[in-house]
Amino acid sequence: MTDKKQTLTQVREKYLPNGFASARPCCVKKAKGALVWDMDDKEYIDFAGGIAVMNVGHSHPSIVSAVKDQAEKFMHTCFMVLPYESAIKLAQKLSTSVPGPSEKKAMFVNSGAEAVENAIKIARYYTKKTGIIAFESGFHGRTLLGMSLTSKVKPYKLGFGPFAPEVYRIPFAYCYRCPFGKEYPSCDVKCADLLEDFFISHTAPETTAALIAEPIPGEGGYMVPPPEYFPKLKAICEKYGILLIADEIQTGMGRTGKLFAMEHWGVEADITTTAKSLAAGIPLSAVVGKAGIMDSVHPGGIGGTYGANPLACSAALAVFDVIEQENLLQKGKDLGDKLMSGLRDLSNDFHLIGDVRGLGALVAIELVKDLKTKQPAPEEAKAITDYCFEQGLILLSCGTYGNVLRFMMPLVTTDQQMETGIRILSKAFQSIINK
């Protein structure tokens, strides 16, 4: 460890609280594309992407240029005081890009959690109802309402209660661990039909404002639902006058091979939230909803000081350009296909891998101690991510049991970088077996 790195580590330990933790001890010096270098100039292949934030890659020249250009003009006026072109153009871009034929409008805040909070506010205001249904695998942020909607207790909710009321939880379509003991497709996707029964013993549709769902749960473990799942849920919501909120904070901006994941199933959400890769690392989130729903709120009822920050909006507009000009939707799909193929090969060699799943470049493997019992293997997952880090591959675990490895590499990752990453991962599995 260099003297500078050791000094930074000591300063961090002295002035940053334990709760504000980092997965790894290194300090980043620079990053480019799908690569990161630490203070000792050690190179890492980044399969974490800042938790799915860097879809267009680190420090993309077009994004850097857009931010520099905007910074030289002005950095803040507060859109609620003095509006500007970049925010207006971005609202137009998002409103015409989120799937579905309805006219839409967009508003901006800073984080995914803020977007979720505003989506719930708008849904409650529009419907004049208060109940919110979320999913057992869902993650929606760390604010009070975000925590209340989030399912996993440790580390996100432990000790932080009491939580916001009128939040009800229902199982998600977790085919590998079906909560009903069924198998697809003979199950006829009964997990979606459960929503109707849910209204009998948990919350009445007359008091339920919205159902909020990640199209593919992120922190929950990247479970890809059957194609009939969301169309069924949407039909039930429409039947009872309940809004469907699609939390596309992690699945959006090209991660699944489409700009937004709901496109895969032809479902139009009433409200969509997006953040993470929207502005390539500049804090920005958006709530995009049907125009009538968004317009229902009185002037000044939604917004914030930093919402639609001009630097972030300029970056986001450049992100859309990069995705189109570099054909990143197709590249992401191809990247995901290569990764899925490599992981399936690994699953044949290492029986720790119980399931390989994904959509586009949103990919995960679930580790188990036994293929028949499916007993989760969180210790092995941690050991593998530790090994990979030491060998120059940044990889994160997730899942209800902490036994899922998720891959969030930039969509600009090269074939060589992908092959190197899979090779390191293979060695990591071999190291576990040899212990």
Image (spheres, rainbow, N blue to C red):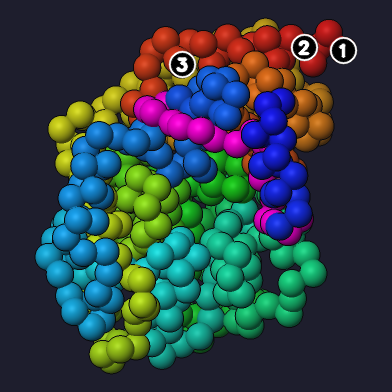
Q: What's the residue at 87%, 12% (across, down)?
A: 435
Tell me the crowding category of disc 3: few under 14, some 14 to 19, or many 20 or more residues within 10 angstroms, Cα based. Answer: many
| Contact check, label 3 and label 1, Cβ < 8 Å | no
Horizontally, residue 207 falls left or right of residue 155, namely: left
| Contact check, label 2 and label 1, Cβ < 8 Å | yes
Give whichever of 312, 12 is nearer the camera: 12
Give whichever of 175, 8 is nearer the camera: 8
Q: CA distance from mark 2 to mark 1?
A: 6 Å
Of callouts 2 and 3, the N-terminal one: 3
Location of mark 2 (residue): 431
Location of mark 3 (residue): 418
Location of mark 1 (residue): 435
Horizontally, residue 139 falls left or right of residue 236, namely: right
The amino acid type of the residue labelled 3 equals: Met
Horizontally, residue 41 falls left or right of residue 105, namely: right
Q: Secondary structure at mark 1?
A: loop
Give the extent of the magenta segment: 16-34
